[in-house]
Every structure is written in structure tokens, then in C-alpha cells.
Image (cartoon, rainbow, N blue to C red):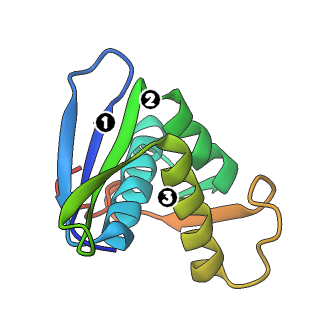
Amino acid sequence: NGHTLLLFQRCNKPRTWTEHENINFAVEAIIAMYETRLAESHPTRGQVHYKVGDLIGFISQCREFAALVYDQTINAYVPRDKAWLQEKIVAHMRRKLGNEVYSYTNYEIVEGFQGGRRNNRGL
């Protein structure tokens, strides 16, 4: 669970990357990226509702989404794909929301936005 680089390309936009202390911060950044996109597409709403499955779909729709996660045991970065990131997001949301999340595709998340944006470390 070491230093993590996220590498992604949404649709026809340029490829980009972000740097995070660990995978947990990287997962939070992915969630924030999705919530920012929702807020921008619904600027008049104070709250945005979404399901974890929608967030998973956001990653699937990206042309590229991968991570390089530093592994101290081998002293190297290990590449991780979309499916691995999606599993980490589901696990993160289960921890965050408690054991009541049994089916991530049916659980609704409600996020409030102040000023229509969320601080997400530049994403």
C-alpha cells in the first residue's frame, strides 16, 4: 500500500497522471474526480446522487485507467488495471459506508457540494 501513480485518459482528452501517498488517497482522488464531474454536469443541484456502480462505470468508460503502486518487498512499482482499481473502490466504499453495502450497484451515495466543487487535490 505504497506510493501510487494514477494514469488515466478520459474519452479523447490527453493522457494525464496524478501522484498519491498510497492507494487509499488514490481511491479518494478517483471518487473526487467522479463527484466533480457530476457536479459540473449538474451545476444547479446542491446535492448529487449516485450509485457505486455509476462510479465503477465511470472508470470503465475511460479509455485508460491504471495505477502503478510501489511495493516495498520488491522495491518496484507494480502495474494495476481498471478491474483492480474498481475492486479497491468497492472495498473502500464498504469500509466508508459500513456493512450495509451488500450490492454496490444498488447502494446510493449522496454527496453535498459547496460552491459546486470539492477539494480534490487538483483533479
Q: What amino acid is found at the position of numbered circle 3 in the picture?
A: Gly
84 or 34, which lies in front?
A: 84
Query: Going from the N terminus, do you reach mark 2 or mark 3 first?
Result: 3
Taking the spot 76% from the left edge, 84% from the top edge, the residue there is 99
Q: Are marks 3 and 1 in contact (CB under 8 Å)?
A: no
Q: What amino acid is found at the position of numbered circle 2 in the picture?
A: Cys
Q: Are marks 2 and 1 in contact (CB under 8 Å)?
A: yes
Q: Is residue 119 above or below residue 72?
A: above
Query: Going from the N terminus, do you reach mark 3 or mark 1 first?
Result: 1
In the rendered structure, the answer to whether residue 34 lies left or right of residue 77 reads: right
Q: How many tags in the picture?
A: 3
Mark 1 nearby-residue class (10 Å; few <14, some 14–19, many ≥20): many
From the top left corner, tell me how far across and down residue 44 is, in percent.
46, 45
Helix, strand or loop under label 2: loop
Q: What amino acid is found at the position of numbered circle 1 in the picture?
A: Phe
User: Which residue bears the numbered disc 1?
Assistant: 8
Rendered image quadrant of residue 29: bottom left
From the top left corner, tell me how far across and down residue 23 is, in percent.
35, 67
- Residue 113, which numbered label? none
Taking the spot 81% from the left edge, 56% from the top edge, the residue there is 106
Rendered image quadrant of residue 110: bottom right
Taking the spot 36% from the left edge, 27% from the top edge, the residue there is 10
